[in-house]
Image (spheres, rainbow, N blue to C red):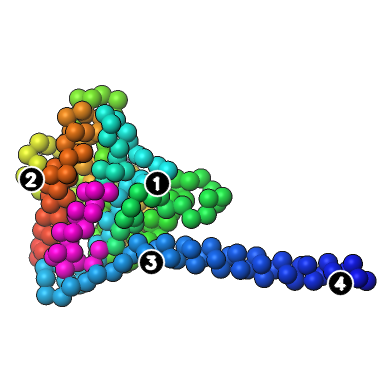
Amino acid sequence: MRLVFFGASQRKKAFPLRLLLAVLLLLAFSREITTVARPVSRPGLPLSGKTIVIDPGHGGYDPGVVAHGVIEKDVVLAISLKLRGYLQGAGARVVMTRETDRDLLVLPAAGPKKRQDMRNRIIIINAAAPDLVVSVHANAISSTRWRGAQAFYRIDDGEARVLAEIIQEELARVLKNTDRQAKPGNFFVLNESSATGVLVETGFISNPDEARLLNDGRYQDRVAWAIYLGLLRYLGRTP
Ligand SMILES: [Zn+2]
């Protein structure tokens, strides 16, 4: 009897303990999201009332592309933070999927890392209910020859195509070093996002010259400015 009673009592204790653990994990998760999703909205400016999510690719355990001493996760975060500054200056509410060198892993044991990281980005994006999403990356291929920034959109999203083409025009105009065209691309972040979005490959880290540029604060600023002008033009156009 005593043993049975003891066993039952242990089970009773185990249940709230598991519940407590689940609540703690949920709290940790929601805190991650609210920390990142800091809404700022300023009235009376060109982008007042607009919400834009910036998704700096990679971070934390995932460096992205690494070549010529340049690390994609650092470059795209620097560009994204500059872009946030321009957008907030124009009155937009900006939500970042990350603001520091971190990934979006909350539950280390729950499935493959990359998938979990990407799913959590989508949760942040869709929770923000944004007008637009910009995912910022840098490219690399085996040849060191290729270079140039390029905007990608989901193939069946006509609005995203318009946005990508406008951003591509601004990249060409501001950076003066690419004649690339906006292209459709099969990217998880674009496919799963509920809002119109583009993925900007800001240049090729595999090209030593472009890697050096992408690591330079002034060049990062110009890339951010070009993307900002594209977003501004897109949102300001009459339908
Ligand atoms: Zn990337």
Q: Which residues are magenta?
A: 77-94
Q: Amino acid at mark 3?
A: Thr
Residue at mark 3:
34
Residue 60 is marked as 1
What is the quadrant of the N terminus in the image? bottom right
**Taking the image as drawn, is residue 218 in sight?**
yes
Q: Amino acid at mark 4?
A: Phe
Query: Does label 3 or label 2 sit earlier along the sequence?
Result: 3
3D distance between C-alphas at marks 3 and 4: 44 Å
Residue 174 is marked as 2
> Could you tell me if the residues under marks 3 and 4 are in contact, i.e. CB atoms within 8 Å?
no
Residue at mark 4:
5
Cβ at disc 2 under 8 Å from ligand 1: no
Query: Is residue 128 in the magenta section?
Result: no
3D distance between C-alphas at marks 3 and 2: 34 Å
Q: Which residue is rendered at x = 32% and y = 33% of the image?
A: 66
